[in-house]
Amino acid sequence: MSLIFEISRKGRRCAQFPDRKVHQYELPENLTRKQLDLPEVAEVDLVRHYMGLSRLAFGVDNGFYPLGSCTMKYNPKVNEEVAALEGFNEIHPLQPASTVKGALEALKQLQDALCELTGMDAMTLKPAAGAHGEFTGMQIVKKHFVASGHPERNEVIIPDSAHGTNPASAAMNGLKVVAVKSNENGGVDLDSLREAVGEHTAALMLTNPNTLGLFDENIEEITRIVHEAGGLCYYDGANLNAVMGLVRPGDIGFDVIHLNLHKTFSTPHGGGGPGSGPVGCKAFLAKHLPDPVIGENGFEYSEDSIGSVRSFYCNFLVCMKALTYIKVMGSDGLKLASENAVLNANYLLSRIKDIYDVSYDRVCMHEFVLGLQRLKDETGITAKDIAKGLLDFEIHPPTMYFPLIVHEALMFEPTETESRETLDRCAEVLRHLHDLAYSDPAYYEGVPHTTVVSHVDEVTAARNPILKYEK
Ligand SMILES: *Cc1c(COP(=O)(O)O)cnc(C)c1O
């Protein structure tokens, strides 16, 4: 594909400006640009350029996208319509609060809905993504112990199956990471946890269902062990899609949580943003939330706040899309979404688990993890080959090589928005790819065969990336 600058021809335009009868003024020399290179194209060229670019990428609007942990559910277009409303889209973060009362009211409604859904007492919408929410949550934990005279509580316990952002968020706050093992069911090993807790424990960071797609049945025992040792429990809400309306983190012992609005609440993500990672907490921690919070009377500030964690208030339009989703779905709809997310994952798994090995053979929640070590041993075909092979059938690869405790891992999360026909087709493609691994392993040389960019040399791509366009 050509760059838009390459198809540019002097004088071509795709806009006609209205004839304005206004005076012309000379601008001072120091305020004018000497040169501004902008592409000059006709409207048809512009449309084709962007359509062409969109075809180079794969998104959830192109096809099935079972990227585990990331919850690539369909994003209803009504969310976009609401976010585009003038009162939401054409306000400025520097406007006085008194002129944006409706927007603040909408944010308050979202906060309240998220509190209700998670069993938390207070919520901030500030963090810009899940990892930023974790960072904020860990600051709150740290502040709590420093403020209550226990700065020695500086260890965060994290299971070995955790998402990489969990240990990173703890470490970036100067907290020490203590790993605990998973048991034979894929849950937290209680004995390891009992050994890990102590007078230095600040918090446990946990996602439930965990990154293996398994609900930890010992969850109440787990949070009790941590509380009895004097620590707090942090819930990584990235997997809330499995339990909305069914389980509230606040009811099973969690004190601080983050959510990923861009995952669970259907706002487009990927390609770097924008996201939103609200952080909720129990009442005793609310005074530490980042400034300002939206209370009954607009913005409120607290002396005990951890301070600000970003410019302005939040990724506002992402929040409006999430609010729209929640309102359209209603509480019954959200519950049904979670039930169907779990059903879809179990359905897809049941259609392939006679030939693929599943990492933990239990009823899964909204996602499951295959382990392809046996396939690799028998055929030389890896999890990566199968993942890339899916692209030739217009299916986005699942998450690969994560969680780290499963060898040759492929993590599928179909989400609730996919039909039975889509799941059936995915199962058939996966069965076909499995057959090919045994009957024609050479097929996998250079997969994917049909995409614009095919098999890249990943070492070269990582070591010598070409980040600048060169003809
Ligand atoms: C996605 C994810 C995160 C991080 O969220 P981002 O919004 O990508 O920063 C954290 N934990 C889990 C389990 C996740 O799936």
Image: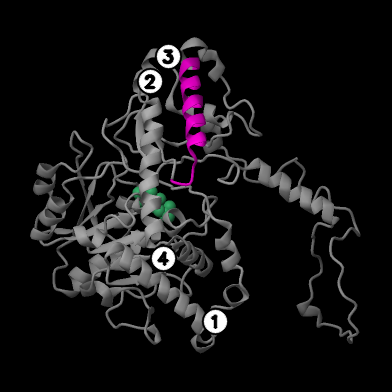
- Quick check: marks 3 and 4 in contact, CB under 8 Å? no
Rounded to the nearest angstrom, the CA distance separating label 2 from label 3 is 14 Å
Beta carbon at label 1 within 8 Å of ligand 1: no
- Quick check: marks 4 and 2 in contact, CB under 8 Å? no
Q: How many neighbours does mark 4 have within 10 angstroms: few (below 14), some (14-19), or many (20 or more)?
A: many
In primary-sequence order, the first of circles 1 and 3 is 1
Whether residue 401 is visible, yes or no, is no
Q: Which residues are magenta?
A: 416-436
Q: Position of residue 204 (x, y in %)?
A: 21, 55
User: In which quadrant will I find the C terminus?
Assistant: top right
Q: Position of residue 187 (x, y in %)?
A: 21, 41
Q: How many discs appear?
A: 4
Q: How many neighbours does mark 3 have within 10 angstroms: few (below 14), some (14-19), or many (20 or more)?
A: some
The amino acid on which the numbered mark 1 sits, given as a three-letter code, is: Leu
In primary-sequence order, the first of circles 3 and 4 is 4
Which structural element holds mark 4? loop
* Residue marked by disc 4: 127
Rounded to the nearest angstrom, the CA distance separating label 1 from label 2 is 58 Å
Which structural element holds mark 3? helix
The amino acid on which the numbered mark 2 sits, given as a three-letter code, is: Ile
